[in-house]
Amino acid sequence: MNAKNLIQGIGILIIFLLMSCQKDDDKLSVVIEDDDQTETTSDPVYTEYFNQSISEAMESNKDNHEVSGDEKWEEEGAITIQLNETSITTTEGSVEINGTTATITKAGIYIIQGTLSDGQIMVNTEDEETVKIVLNNVSVTNTSNAPFGVMSAEKVVVFLPENTQNTFSDATTYVYEGDEDEPNATFFSKADLSIYGTGNITVNANYNDGISSKDGLIISSGNFTINSVDDGIRGKDYLIIKGGTFNVQSDGDAFKSDNDDDEDRGYILIENGTFNVATTAGDGFSAETDLLIADGAFDLVTGGGSDSFDEEVSSKALKAGINNVIEGGTFTINSADDALHCDGNLVIGGGTFSIASGDDGIHADEELTINGGEITITESYEGLESNVLTINDGTIHLVSSDDGINGAGGNDGSGIRPGQGNSSSSSKSSLYIQGGYIVVEASGDGVDVNGSIEMTAGILLVNGPAQGANGPLDYDNSFKISGGLLIAAGTSNMAQAPSSTSTQNSILLYLDSQSANTLFVVQNSEGEALVTYSPSVRYESIVYSSSKLVKSSSYKVYIGGSATGSETDGLYEDATYNSGTLVSSFTLSSTITQIN
């Protein structure tokens, strides 16, 4: 040991001995950190956060094929196609009948009704006008191919009249002529397809997809029951749903748009609707580019639920490749994989979420921005994960078996489980808390950022971890706090307080192990409680930061006892405190006060 280190070591020992002599039985020692201490800090890299709206995202997507008048049809002049179990009749030459196959060859309005026990409805026209098809209580099965197929048309519009019941069921194996491989879905279209009306349609897809368009698919309304061995409803170029009720059980993805050749396609837009989804080995909603949700009611179970995580299978509930923007809706999600996921940027502007996930609750590879909503994550590996996280508003409660909030660069592997492969890290990752109410209960790090944290407003309550080589707060560069309320309780192994470059004062208290729900109280010199908090986990360290902590003022810290008053998530308001144990008295003279 050189002379400098020896002198420093002796100095530290003397300070420790002096403070130990001063220590009362009911008090812990207080270390006031020097504001001028050398500290490795790094400002958050991003000064602006991603905050795109649905309307802004749609500016970069292809316009849809809907025009005024698509939603209407007139019975006058319509052509009737009558299905008679084993035969088909019509009086119009624009419908070619070949046994139990009816092929529409011209644009116009067609009313189809009746039952075919083994047959097919086809559209094959070069006309530039729209083909409109009214399904008036239709039931079609096919034992060798698809019961409904659009092979060529400019656009096809299907109507489901009120109170009608329509059913289409296909074969388990298709028989094609020559090198053909289409149709490949029970209700298939190679052209733009729209569906209107309030009637009912059931699709039993035994070969591949249920309803599929190789161009754009617009669903305005209706009641859909889809049972599919692969994808449920697919619009390759785009899938737009304006309303309706959907009950989908699929072995693949329930709703999908997968055009990966054009950057302005491959998107899903949900304006409203009721969605009841169960997938065995696929995603609930999967968009190659953008998934945009304005409103709706969603009950989604993917991959068998949160107990069925499989790293080899994508079973996410709401997945997008570029932008995932949610502005409203009610979501009940039980997913084997991530509940909300985006390879790019994810924005939550509102909505109510109840999430149980076998992997991440909410994950974005690039940026995650939360501007509002009520988010409850009852089960997850990691609760919130992204390279850059910005929380501006909203109420968030999350439980995680690993990190509660994880700021890490790279893809979904950044929060990878032990044994899954290498995890990625980025010292440029950032967490911005600029509002909101956040409650974390974590078995790993409560908040873990491979970079910097900045908190200017809001409430952040961190509970855990209760054990292990983790800490309630874990950051690589800096944690600057200038506003809001921060409480972080858990192990002392890797406990960190905010940085001394903060403008709001903080204390870090080390304790003997305290059982869960043991009160932590800070009082000012007049005996008024600044904070009364009951952590939900066992703890041996606690961080407290608030604008109520004022330099040159005196405080007392109590542990245990009881409190009465209004309590939410362990935090008391207007509490009356009784019978606690005084563990420290100190005068705040620096930004960070460590109480050992």
Image (tube, rainbow, N blue to C red):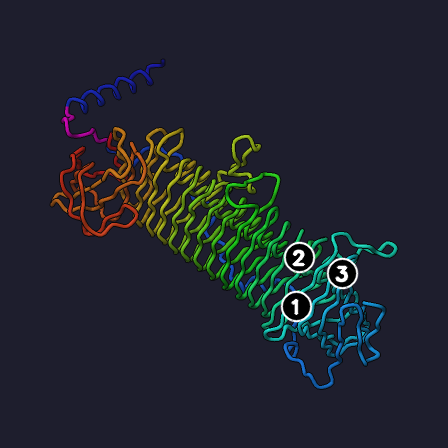
Question: Which of the two discs, 3 and 1, labels the residue nearer the N terminus?
Answer: 3
The verdict on residue 247 being magenta is no
Query: Which secondary structure lies at badge 3?
Result: loop
Q: Amino acid at mark 2?
A: Glu
- Residue 25 lies within the magenta run: yes
Q: Quadrant of the C terminus?
A: top left
Q: Nearer the viewer, residue 562 or 304?
A: 304
Q: CA distance from mark 2 to mark 3?
A: 37 Å
The local secondary structure at tag 2 comes to loop
> Which residue does the numbered mark 2 point to in the structure image?
263
Check disc 3: other Cα within 10 Å, few if <14, some if 14-19, many if 20+.
many
Amino acid residing under circle 3? Asn
Q: Amino acid at mark 1?
A: Asn
Mark in front: 2 vs 3: 3
Q: Which residue is tagged 3? A: 142
Query: Is residue 34 at least partly visible in the picture?
Result: no
Query: What residue does disc 1 label?
Result: 166
Viewer-closest of 1 and 93: 93
Report the side of 207 relative to 103 (left or right).
left
Q: Main secondary structure of the magenta part?
A: loop
Q: Name the quadrant containing residue 510.
A: top left
What is the distance, in whole Å, between disc 1 and disc 2 at their CAs?
36 Å
| Residue 131 found in image quarter | bottom right
Q: CA distance from mark 3 to mark 1?
A: 15 Å
Q: Earlier in the sequence, mark 2 or mark 3?
A: 3
For marks 1 and 2 on the same chain, the one whose residue lies earlier in the sequence: 1
Residue range of the region highlighted in magenta in the rendering: 22-31
* Position of residue 439 in the picture relative to residue 159 (left or right): left
